[in-house]
Each structure stands twice: as structure tokens, then as C-alpha cells.
Image (tube, helix red, strand yellow):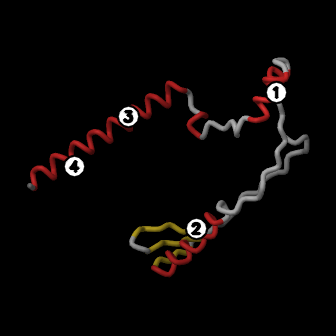
Amino acid sequence: LMGKPMIEYQLQSEFLGLISTGNKYAVASRGDFALEGAFLWKLKDEIDVKWMNGYKQLPEMQVDLQVPEIAQTKGAAAMAAFAEAPMRCGGCGAKVGASTLSRVLKVVRERRHKQEQTLGSSSAEKN
């Protein structure tokens, strides 16, 4: 991507796996060795919090505005509009085709509606 030769990636032969099992309890494994306990959940929580905090204080982004050629051919007004536009990211949903996204969202809405109906009828039965 940057015109540099690729560096061969070396997979780790062993790694630490920390999996939360709920109720502030976790299981750890590395190779053939395994442990479990609440103290591992505390360790996992510290690691996760530190990781997520890394996304709260992001460095200032360098703006390297690369204007598409089509915008350059449309004149000064188009160039000004392009330069003033906020980030043109459509979010992760923009990476999915419209028909696929619509189909999935329809299923999500239908499931939510069924859950709401089930919860509503359950609470009505109790009263």
C-alpha cells in the first residue's frame, strides 16, 4: 500500500487466552497450561480497560485531503464544498450493500417486535 516491500508476519506459537465466564470469573490458558478464578477476571478487566482507554485519547489526525478527479473537474464551488464537507465515512454499515443491510435490519426489527410481544404477554399473564 505504501510502496514498501511486505514484511512476513510470524504467528505466535503460544498466546495467553483470557475468557470471561460471567460473574466476574475468568479462565486463562497458554499452551497446555490453564487456570481459572476471580483474580483472572480482574486481570482481564484491567487489560480490557487499558485497551479501551487507548481509544478515548486519540492523537490529532493529519488531514491529507485527496480530492477525487471528478470533483476537481466540477469547478471552484464543488472544490469548496468538498473541502468543507465533514468526514465522508458512512460508518460500518456503509460497507454493506443497501439490499443486504435492509434485509438484516428487517430481521432485527421483526425479532425485536416478537420479543416485545412475548414480554408484553408474559407481564399481562402475571397481572
Which badge, 1 or 4, is on the more N-terminal residue?
A: 1
The 10 Å Cα crowd at callout 1, few under 14, some 14 to 19, many 20 or more, is some
Q: Amino acid at mark 4?
A: Leu
Residue type pointed to by label 2: Asp
Q: CA distance from mark 1 to mark 4?
A: 53 Å
Task: Give the alpha-carbon distance from disc 4 to disc 2, as whole Å.
Answer: 33 Å
State the residue at coordinates (82%, 45%): 63
Q: Nearer the viewer, mark 4 or mark 2?
A: 4
**Mark found first going from the N terminus, 3 or 2:** 2
Badge 2 crowding class, 10 Å Cα cut-off, few under 14, some 14 to 19, many 20 or more, is few
At label 4, counting other C-alpha atoms closer than 10 Å, the crowd grade (few under 14, some 14-19, many 20 or more) is: few
For the residues labelled 3 and 2, the Cα–Cα distance comes to 32 Å
SS at circle 2 = helix
Q: Is residue 31 visible?
A: no
- The residue mark sitting in front, 1 or 2, is 1
Q: Quadrant of the C terminus?
A: bottom left
**Mark 4 touches mark 2? (CB < 8 Å):** no
Instruction: Report the Cα–Cα distance between label 3 and label 4.
Output: 18 Å
Q: Tags 1 and 2 in contact by the CB under 8 Å rule?
A: no
Q: CA distance from mark 1 to mark 2?
A: 43 Å
Q: Residue at x 66, y 66 (%)?
A: 14
| N-terminal label among 3 and 4 | 3
Judged from the image, the secondary structure of the residue bearing numbered disc 1 is helix
